[in-house]
Image: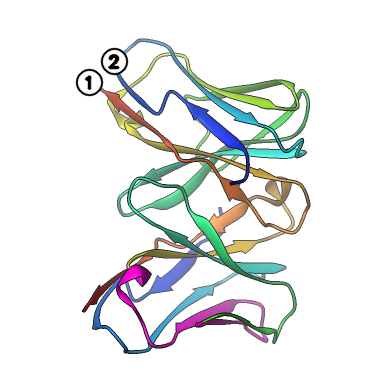
Amino acid sequence: GQQLNQSPQSMFIQEGEDVSMNCTSSSIFNTWLWYKQEPGEGPVLLIALYKAGELTSNGRLTAQFGITRKDSFLNISASIPSDVGIYFCAGQGSNSGYALNFGKGTSLLVTP
Amino acid sequence: DAGITQSPRHKVTETGTPVTLRCHQTENHRYMYWYRQDPGHGLRLIHYSYGVKDTDKGEVSDGYSVSRSKTEDFLLTLESATSSQTSVYFCAISGRDTGELFFGEGSRLTVL
């Protein structure tokens, strides 16, 4: 599959801080998505981006679809303890039945 | 909830035995996917389906087969389980070609 490089691998921050993570690929994607996974559960969709340059917000979360279509970032503002989890970027190409290629995840820990 | 049920949720088996995991959806979605999740690898696509009896291979399909005889059910079979297939398996569904996948809660398989 098409490889996505997600960074950082992990983050340990204090409540109230802002968080930024990003994802890059050598391939172009038609759609970029960000998921969050909590222990023992499946990934849950946070934000989906459909157009190059698109900037989309969902509450305290903001994500952007890079102009080159090869990258995306996710920002979380004013983090809270329930933001803890693993965040995955995912890109959708035009093959494999619209399946997603996933990054390896960013593990976020937030201390009160 | 996206109306996805995976079974069994946990299974321990021995090397060489056959194993079948079931994904059941109540959303009447066209696309269904099986991913495996392993530490350091993120989520990797095993097989996917784009309709009844229409399936295709993903990135890590060796040792796995699938079947979809009804819209609502997508079965993943390990004909002869190996220790390298110890993993958490996630089913996902999608009703559109936009890449918005909805995941089940996962099936944890341990092969001894």
Instruction: For marks 1 and 2, give the CA distance.
Output: 6 Å
Mark 1 crowd level (few <14, some 14–19, many ≥20, 10 Å Cα): some
At mark 2, the secondary structure is loop
Q: Is A68 part of what is drawn in magenta?
A: yes
Query: For mark 2, what is the residue?
Result: B15
Is A95 drawn above or below residue A7 in the view shown? above
Label placed on residue A111: none
The spot of residue A38 in percent (x, y) is 37, 56
Q: Is residue A91 magenta?
A: no
Q: Work out which residue is located at the far top of the displayed protein and give it.
A: B17
For the residue pair A9 and A110, the one nearer the viewer reads as A110
Q: Secondary structure at mark 1?
A: loop
Classify the position of the C terminus of chain B by image quarter.
top left
Residue at image position (34%, 76%) is A8
Instruction: Please give the residue where the numbered disc 1 appears in the rendered image.
Output: B112
Residue at the location (55% across, 32% down)? B5
Q: Position of residue A85 (x, y in %)?
A: 35, 63
Looking at this view, is B27 or B43 the one in front? B27
Q: Which residues are magenta?
A: A60-83
Q: Left or right of A50: which side holds A59? A: left
Location of residue B11 by image quarter: top left
The reply to whether the C-beta atoms of the residues labelled 1 and 2 are less than 8 Å apart is yes
N-terminal label among 1 and 2: 2
- Position in image of residue A45 (x %, y %): 56, 61
Q: Chain of mark 1?
A: B
In the rendered structure, which amino acid carries the disc numbered 2? Thr
Judge whether B20 appears above or below A62 on screen. above
